[in-house]
Amino acid sequence: MLKQCLEVFEILDCASANGNKVKELFQKYGNVDVQVSKINGNNGSTDFVRILIKGVNGKTEGGTSPTLGITGRLGGLGARPEITGFVSDGDGAFAALVAGLKILDMSNKGDALKGDVIVTTHICPNAPTIPHYPVALMDSPVDTAIINELEVKDEIDAVLSVDTTKGNKVLNSKGFAITSTVKEGYILKVSDDLLNIMMRVTGKMPVVLPISMQDITPYGNGIYHLNSIMQPSVATKAPVVGIAITTEVPVAGCATGATHIYDIEMTSRYLVEVAKDFTSGLCNFFENEEFEKLVDLYGSMAHLQKTK
């Protein structure tokens, strides 16, 4: 998937990066539904991008196969004019778009997936930065709650949230990691199916990013968050799994020269493999019977999805 990596990076690593350039790239591959909308916020603006890649038995065509959402989480692709170039924080958007481009390319070549895949992210080359321990993070030009609502819609049956997760001392492994499944305020066990796919893609033992209760609460509540990787979980009833692009040492989200192309390729390849299996009914993000038993025993945890 290096071809798709290079094509996507060419348009993202640019001071004039925007959603329409992403749309043009995808449409070069064939007929695809790409929606671009400009969102204005207190710290600037960004282009929200939503890409629908239809499956052969997808819901949009009246089919029954499940729909997967892949969302590239970030504050911004760059922190211009303070910092020159593509920043580490953009890796989540980078990987999500590469996966989407590959799935579209597969579809055009006769290997369409069973179900629909919806890829979302936003394109901002000049986002602000914020102080954060142990290294500075990128801020979002618009309210995170607005992005959350745009990322996850009712037709999505599960979400992969891809985010750069390098600015911490919690996980010290270069490549990518996955989180436990989060659903309606519950942090569930790590999916065996997702672990198995990770092993076949990487050829190594799987790596899991630990998350806390704080991480699955909404931004803006005054509580510490590792980063925004689990924020889609506050806006949907669908199961959400974080896909963290990681390093051995803490790297600031606003750092440039920190994007490792082979890590992006491997992460994107994992996203594609999960999309294949999930939309074919071969991969479960959680065990529904056990989730229902948890709710029966301990009640709903959906209040954790709200700020107050």
Image (cartoon, rainbow, N blue to C red):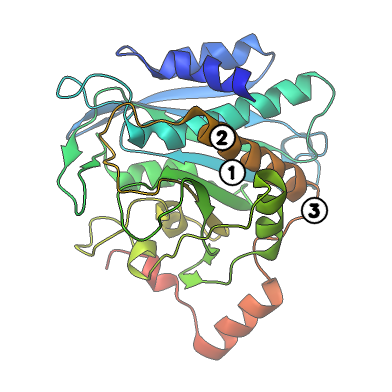
Residue at the farthest right position? 110
Residue 240 disc label: none
**Depth check, front residue: 206 or 237:** 206
Q: Residue at horizontal 54%, vertical 31%?
A: 262
Residue underneath mark 3: 281
Left or right? Give the position of 109 relative to 31: right
Above or below 223: residue 81: above
Q: Position of residue 143 (x, y in %)?
A: 27, 43
Tell me the kind of residue under disc 1.
Gly
Is residue 166 in view from this perspective? yes
Task: State the separation of the CA atoms marked 1 and 2.
Answer: 6 Å
Q: Residue at horizontal 32%, vertical 67%?
A: 214
Q: Residue at horizontal 51%, vertical 47%?
A: 176
**Could you tell me which quadrant the N terminus lies in?**
top right
Residue 190, by quadrant, is: bottom right
SS assignment at label 3: loop
Q: Residue at horizontal 29%, vertical 13%?
A: 15
User: Which circle's residue, 1 or 3, is located before the other in the chain?
Assistant: 1
Residue underneath mark 1: 69
Tell me the kind of residue under disc 3.
Gly
SS assignment at label 2: strand
Residue underneath mark 2: 119
Q: Position of residue 96 (x, y in %)?
A: 53, 34
Circles 1 and 2 in contact, beta carbons < 8 Å: yes
